[in-house]
Amino acid sequence: MNKWLEKPWVIRVVALILSVLLFVVVAFDENVYDNDDGFELSFGTNNETQTMDDVPVQTQIDQDKYVVSGVPETVSVTLQGSVSSVTSTVLQRNFDVYVSLEDLGTGTHTVPLEYSGIADRLNVYIEPQEVEVTIEERASQEFNVTIDTVNRDKVEEGYEVANVYADPEQVVVTSSKSIVDKIEIVKGFVDVSGFSESQTLENVPVKVYDSQGNELNVRIDPPTVDVSVEMKNPNKTVPISIKTENEAPEDVRVTSMELETKEVQVFADESYLDQLEEIATEPIDLSQITESGTIDVPLEIPKDVRKVNSETVKVNVNVETIEEETIEDVTIDYGNEVDEQSVTFIEPDTNSMNITMRGFPSDLEKVAEADLQLTIDIGDRAPGEHQLPVELITPEGLPEGVAFELEYEQVTVNIEQEE
């Protein structure tokens, strides 16, 4: 056998036979399903159908002059043919699907979807087969960018947004003229939750809206801006005032209420701080105070105030209660003795008695023994024993809250006629 293979003419014959067999196989696989007379070969069963979704669609038009709407971003393409051709095309996807609009003017048109780069031996079906498109003249316009800060009320306590800047301040919006004419607002959004320091946010997307607040699908150049947010914490130090309510108990007097801290630092809008003069405490209920001491009192914080450096304040409260004090041996005055008569005290057996004063200490200390005078009226009474009422005379301007109690409301005296 080896000797046969060594002969040149044998090798040529084998090569020729292999070439013929290879040609037959390829021809069968490519295009021998039907002959030219429409006769289907009995062995033509090697057929394949595959569908590709999300095939991108290109638009052939001068995009510097026109804007097209209505062209789908993707379509479905179904291929039918031999296994090798279909599989190769599906895997490589080296073909294009497009709509040709270069010969059309502005307006609305129904156009077919076309393809290129697919072998003629394959059957091609595109879904949808045609689309309705609108061609409009392209327009560009420059717009100022505004920035909306979201959650301003959630910045760090005591702070507020001072200023917001966009860089660049303007962008160029490109679309159809009808769309550009509808543009009302061009803005970006920044969430300032938790902000306390000034900072710059990069690549904030820019959005375009019409007068109804609908977002418009347009080309924006640049599509993002850098946003600088300036923060501040305006504050003011103001005095604290004490507010009270109700009356102290009957036997208690509040002599003083003194703040340990007399001022508070208030954080709020500058416009509010300009007219703020003081911060008051919540009302202190005097009816609940029975003794001296220090109490913690909350501050009455207005709704416009964002923060205070202290929400409570200590108040030193001094009170006094009703006390009694006795002035001893106050002389009872009965005027000049009547001629040829003498007066002797029987009950009490002396011409003096004690006076008990009842009142608040601060009032009692204003009363001196010299301010008080006890008198009885002997008048022209006949000799003998007499019970006479005792009158207490006090000077004007004595504190009204002081009450006096005499040791004796009346005295017994004996009037004798002198010989």
Image (spheres, rainbow, N blue to C red):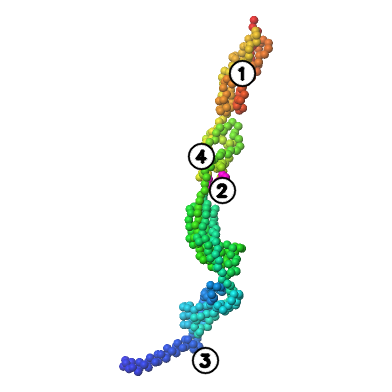
Q: What label does residue 261 carry, if any?
A: 4
| Secondary structure category for the residue under label 3 | loop
- Which mark is first along the chain, 1 or 2? 2
The front one of 122 and 251 is 122
- Which mark is first along the chain, 4 or 3? 3
Looking at the rendered structure, the kind of residue marked 4 is: Thr
Measure the alpha-carbon separation of dots 2 and 3. 94 Å
Residue that protrudes farthest toward the top in the picture: 419
Query: Magenta includes 255?
Result: no
Measure the alpha-carbon separation of dots 2 and 4. 26 Å
**Residue 416 image-quadrant placement:** top right
Q: Bounds of the magenta span?
A: 266-276
**Residue 397 image-quadrant placement:** top right
Measure the alpha-carbon separation of dots 2 and 1. 67 Å
Q: What label does residue 374 carry, if any?
A: 1
Mark 4 vs mark 1: give the one in front: 4
Measure the alpha-carbon separation of dots 4 and 1. 50 Å
- Observer able to see residue 70: no
| Secondary structure category for the residue under label 1 | strand
**Residue where numbered disc 3 is placed:** 36
Q: Residue at x 48, y 60 (%)?
A: 202
Q: Residue at x 32, y 94 (%)?
A: 7
Q: Is residue 232 above or below residue 339?
A: below
Q: What label does residue 186 carry, if any?
A: none
The percent coordinates of residue 349 (x first, y second) are 59, 14
**Residue where numbered disc 2 is placed:** 271
Q: Is residue 146 above or below residue 57?
A: above
Looking at the rendered structure, the kind of residue marked 2 is: Ser
Measure the alpha-carbon separation of dots 1 and 3. 155 Å
Query: Magenta includes 270?
Result: yes
Q: Is residue 396 above or below residue 262?
A: above
Looking at the rendered structure, the kind of residue marked 1 is: Leu
